[in-house]
């Protein structure tokens, strides 16, 4: 699963040709959450509250880039890196 961003100890990855709905996976230590893009929500797994808020903020800032990456992944194209949360 390609890493598309990293910030504050959080690693964001996205599978190529994965099941709908569009979603990245956020990992922080032993925690992992599957993050829905519209609406922004944890679909599966668990993240600490502070991390979940940072990931939600990042998704809000980069939703269009995430959706574009999702489309690339469905076509088995390389995913692009997305800027981290400052």
Image (cartoon, rainbow, N blue to C red):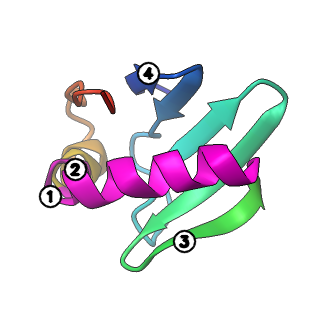
Q: Which mark is residue 6?
A: 4
List the residue tagged with mark 1: 64
Within-10-Å neighbours for mark 4: few <14, some 14–19, many 20+:
some
Q: Alpha carbon of mark 1 to alpha carbon of mark 2: how far?
A: 6 Å
Q: In this view, does 38 lie to the left or right of 68?
A: right
Locate the C terminus by quadrant: top left
Q: Distance between the residues labelled 4 and 1?
A: 18 Å
Magenta stretch bounds: 47-67
The residue to which callout 2 is attached is 62
- Report which residue position mark 3 lands on: 41
Instruction: Identify which residue, 17 or 46, lies in the foreground.
Output: 46
**Residue appearing at x 71%, y 54% in the figure:** 49
User: Within the magenta stretch, is there residue 62?
Assistant: yes
Rounded to the nearest whole Å, what is the CA distance between mark 4 and mark 3?
19 Å
Tell me the SS state at disc 4: strand
Point out residue 29 in the picture as x, y percentages from the top left corner: 77, 24
- The residue sitting at the right extreme is 30
Residue 21: quarter of image: bottom left
* Residue 61 relative to residue 20: left or right: left
Q: Earlier in the sequence, mark 4 or mark 1?
A: 4
Tell me whether the residue at label 1 lies in contact with that at label 2, contact meaning CB atoms closer than 8 angstroms: yes
Q: Label 2, label 3: how many angstroms apart (C-alpha)?
A: 14 Å
């Amino acid at each position: 699963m390609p890493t598309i961003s990293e910030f504050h100890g959080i690693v964001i990855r996205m599978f190529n040709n994965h099941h709908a709905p569009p979603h990245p996976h956020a990992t922080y230590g032993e925690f992992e959450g599957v993050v829905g893009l519209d609406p922004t929500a944890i679909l599966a797994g668990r993240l600490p509250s502070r991390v979940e808020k940072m990931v939600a903020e990042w998704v809000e800032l980069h939703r269009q880039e995430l959706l574009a990456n999702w489309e690339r992944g469905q076509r088995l194209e390389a995913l692009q890196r997305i800027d981290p949360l400052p």
